[in-house]
Amino acid sequence: MVSAPSFEDFDSEDDAQRAEMMRSFLTEYELDDEDLAYLEEDFQFSSQDEDPGYPVLAVVGRPNVGKSTLVNRIVGKRVAVVQDEPGVTRDRVRYDAQWNGKTFTLVDTGGWELDVAGIDKSVAQQSEFAIEQADAVLFVVDATVGATDTDEQIVRLLRRSGKPVILAANKVDAPNQEADAAYLWSLGLGEPYPISALHGRGTGDILDAVLDVLPEVSATAKLRPKHGPRRIALIGRPNVGKSSLLNRLAGENRVVVDPLAGTTRDPVDEIIELDGEQWMFVDTAGIRRRVHLTHGADYYASLRTQGALEKAELGLVLIDASQELTEQDIRVMQQVIDSGRAMVVVCNKWDLVDEERRLMLDREIERELVQMPWVERVNLSAATGWHTNRLTRAMHTALESWDKRVSTGKLNSFLGEIAAANPHPVRGGKQPRILFGTQVANRPPKFVLFASGFIEHGYRRFLERRLREEFGFEGSPVQISVRVREKRKRK
């Protein structure tokens, strides 16, 4: 489905004639099949896809019973961070899964424990929220340990919820261990299904049981707009306030927040309504200095952050405005640009910034972002909510630029005027000419220019700057590719 055309899609008669004239020049040049494909202009510009809500299954249990391993097994790939220590998963993390032709949403949770404090209490609360917002619950118990006091407490919690529960007796890796699973009848939740999440043993049977209790239509999943909400990745170095901002926008504690840097490990998807419009925000793990220097859960969290960014449409890059702009902050912004995503820079913790720091920050941004003057910027405080209402406008501006299409006629009329007013410098007695241009993609906007000679990088930057001045593109990277072609030899 193609998005609605913008005003740039329509040519005036003069624009169309200019484009046709410039296109005719190319008949004198050697063109290959790829060139001809670009010139056909039969491009499918991207638009939003449908994204329905599915029945929700929450996976709960105490720490280190294999919940995330089971989630990876059900989804069919390693999506959840797994490590041989308790407490790796902290937030409610959603994944779409399929079994026997039916799609459902799987919610991985952190380990639930009784009478805990600090970050462990926040993790336990997220598990309780997941149960409330699920259509059914998959309760995972370690069959080799048996029912513990914590498991008994979780059973009481599940009974109060009134949700259908499937009991998974995990770590039954061989038939001779199935007797261990039988002891879990004592929990009073019905038949325990002996499984091995690590080896896949018995997971087909338990998924059949899950489908029996999941409803056809979810009673808890929020309905999404017809074409799906725009996906926004919250990205930045550790402890800049990504999770705090997500909670502030949601109006409730959707994700765990703690002063400990690196609290978030798995990308967390949440649909949030702002100004009457739904958005899909993805909270991500903080990007550390070098991915190859991290290990364990932090290493896999870094990989998942990159994956979440590639699935997003816009990167909301958070920096701590109260601290000096770092090389790490710039690297995060460059990562968004390299991924081809729209970008908004959020200067968070503005409540901690005094007048002197504001002036210093302006100078730092002017100096460090000299190659990114097009980036949208919002100053706000996730802690107090100050100016968070300005995010919607900035995101809309960046996404409209990211989606934008410039017609071939308007583009070539612009290029002709530029070449007449500011021709390329003469080098070696020759002056390269831009013969023709066309936009071949959006998300991000990509332009292909045909030229009679090499176009210097300085002139390419000049073209990009003038292109932005003419057509906008605030908040979106723009890619310009130049194809140098030689004249046909006369026979």
Image (cartoon, helix red, strand yellow):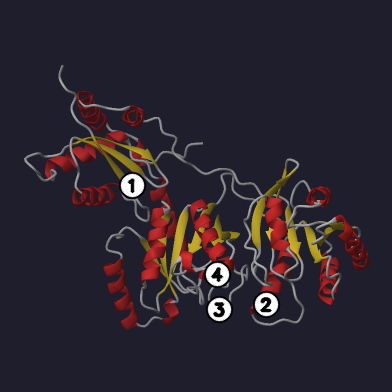
Asked whether residue 447 appears in the rendered view, the answer is yes
Residue at 65% x, 63% y: name it.
Answer: 82
Q: Amino acid at mark 4?
A: Ser
In the image: residue 372, left or right of residue 4? left
Q: Residue 258 appears at what percent x and percent y? A: 58, 77
Helix, strand or loop at mark 3: loop
Q: Is the residue under label 1 in contact with that under label 4 (CB below 8 Å)?
A: no
Does residue 173 sit above or below 83 in this rendering? above
Identify the mark nearer the N-term, 4 or 1.
4
Asked whether residue 275 appears in the rendered view, the answer is no
The residue carrying mark 3 is 260
The residue carrying mark 1 is 479
Identify the mark nearer the N-term, 4 or 2.
2
In the image: residue 292, left or right of residue 268? left
**For the image shown, how many numbered marks are present on the structure?**
4
Does residue 70 sit above or below 359 in this rendering? above
Q: Is the residue under label 2 in contact with that under label 3 (CB below 8 Å)?
A: no
Identify the mark nearer the N-term, 2 or 1.
2
Helix, strand or loop at mark 4: helix
- Kindly indicate the quadrant of the structure image that contains residue 413: top left
Identify the mark nearer the N-term, 1 or 3.
3
Q: CA distance from mark 4 to mark 2?
A: 16 Å
Identify the mark nearer the N-term, 4 or 3.
4
Circle 1 crowding by C-alpha within 10 Å: few under 14, some 14–19, many from 20: some
Identify the mark nearer the N-term, 3 or 2.
2
Q: Amino acid at mark 3?
A: Leu
In the image: residue 422, left or right of residue 306? left
Q: Residue 404 appears at what percent x and percent y? A: 38, 44
Helix, strand or loop at mark 2: helix
The residue carrying mark 4 is 243
The residue carrying mark 2 is 120
